[in-house]
Amino acid sequence: MNSRNKNHGKKVMLLLTIFIATLSTISTPALAGEVAPHWRYGGAENPTQWGSLSKDFALCESGRDQSPINIKNTVESTPSKISFDYKASPLVVINNGHTIQVNYAEGSTVTIDGEKYALIQFHFHTPSEHEINDKAAAMELHLVHRNETGKLAVVGVMLTKGKANPLIEEVWKNIPATGKTNTVSNITINAVKLLPISKAYYSYAGSLTTPPCSEGVKWNVFVEPMTISEEQIEAFEKLYQVDARPIQPINGRSVQLHR
Ligand SMILES: [Zn+2]
């Protein structure tokens, strides 16, 4: 081997070392607080692949009661029996790498069909995850509740383009960097300002719309949308251009309409 070949060999080794170093950087979780395995809305870890990313995510592929769905062919059911007892909460905004989430203080509840659930957090999707009669909205808000036995009830609110929402403005103004939490001690919010006047809603049995796609989630989507301004939609889309799981098969489930 002459010196030129030796040098070449050294260069190859150096490049290999850099390549391996880069690979290990990529495979390390990019965000503090994000738990492996990764899942995303695009690229190789897009929603059609979630079920194969981890054994823990198997239901994303094999589940029969998955969310979101296209809400149509609904069945008229018992009158609306949903009532909210939301209290003010200090503003805590989390930018978790998948969405913007607001954690809620203890003591706020929703009662659905006589069953009480505590509000834990709310977060946003763009475009909407659910469709109503084949139509998606610009965004969708999910208010996540849990009862004493651990059962989840999510209240979905479609957000259509229109007047700005003042509470959402307050949230957007306080979004931290990816992976970070912003506890804003001098601002309190009340999620009641995110609810439409009409309490008519659709209900069905579904799942989490993100991995692990756990089932047994009681879904309640308001018929009446709330509005969000074009500027507010654009501000969110700058951070998360798309964070909505595609529509899942209905598999014979009934969707009830409570007026
Ligand atoms: Zn959601």
Image (cartoon, helix red, strand yellow):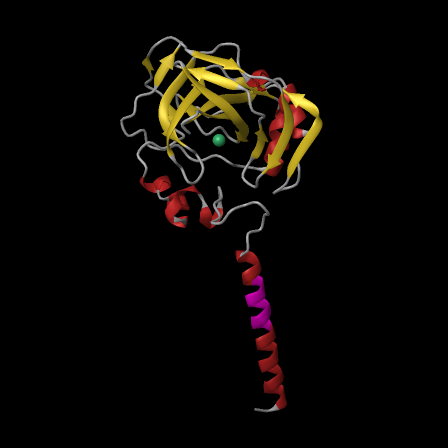
Q: Residue furthest front?
A: 148
Quarter of the view holding residue 228: top right
Point 60% across, 91% down: residue: 2
Magenta span main SS: helix
Would residue 231 be seen by someone viewing this image from the given angle? no
For the residue pair 122 and 244, the one nearer the viewer reads as: 122
Point 43% across, 40% down: residue: 211
Q: Give percent across and percent down for residue 154.
A: 45, 25
Would residue 157 be seen by someone viewing this image from the given angle? yes
Q: Give percent across and percent down for residue 139.
A: 53, 27
Q: Give the side of residue 193 with respect to residue 154, left or right.
A: right
Q: Give the side of residue 220 with respect to residue 11, left or right.
A: left
24 in relation to 130, above or below? below
167 in relation to 246, above or below? above
Q: Quadrant of the C terminus?
A: top left
112 in relation to 70, above or below? above
Q: Give percent across and percent down for residue 50.
A: 41, 44
Point 60% across, 68% down: residue: 18
Point 56% across, 91% down: residue: 1
**Residues drawn in magenta:** 15-22
